Image (tube, helix red, strand yellow):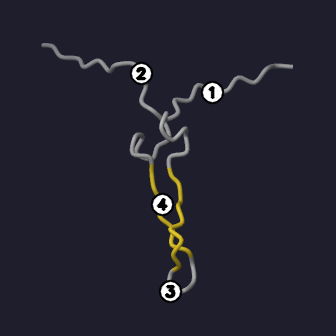
Amino acid sequence: MPEITPAAIRRCGYCDGFPAVAITTGLRTADGDREIVTVTCPACKGTGTAPSGRPRLATAGR
């Protein structure tokens, strides 16, 4: 049987691939629902992936 190899994903090191979370504040709204704050990872800006480690080359010339 072949062995399954996971894809090479560049996960964000700060959020580990979970870029957005919903946090309850403990308060309730006027209709009884819970107050929820959605927060995204500041490092990857909500994408869940990290930039590649290779430097990007800029081409400058004539």
Tell me which numbered mark, 4 or 2, is placed earlier along the sequence: 4
Query: Of residues 4 and 16, which is closer to you in this image?
Result: 16
Tell me which numbered mark, 3 or 2, is placed earlier along the sequence: 3
Mark 4 to mark 3 CA distance (whole Å): 19 Å
Mark 3 to mark 2 CA distance (whole Å): 48 Å
Q: Amino acid at mark 2?
A: Gly
In front: label 2 or label 1: 2
In front: label 1 or label 4: 4
Query: Of residues 47 and 14, which is closer to you in this image?
Result: 14
Which numbered tag is attached to residue 38? 4
Tell me which numbered mark, 4 or 3, is placed earlier along the sequence: 3
Left/right placement of residue 56 relative to residue 51 reads left
Marks 3 and 2: CB-CB under 8 Å? no
Q: Amino acid at mark 4?
A: Thr
Q: Quadrant of the C terminus?
A: top left
Q: Residue at x 39, y 19 (%)?
A: 54
Among all residues in the image, which is located at the extreme right? 1
Query: Of residues 31 and 46, which is closer to you in this image?
Result: 31
Mark 3 to mark 1 CA distance (whole Å): 46 Å
Q: Which residue is mark 2?
A: 53
Q: Which residue is mark 3?
A: 30
Q: Position of residue 27 (x, y in %)?
A: 51, 75
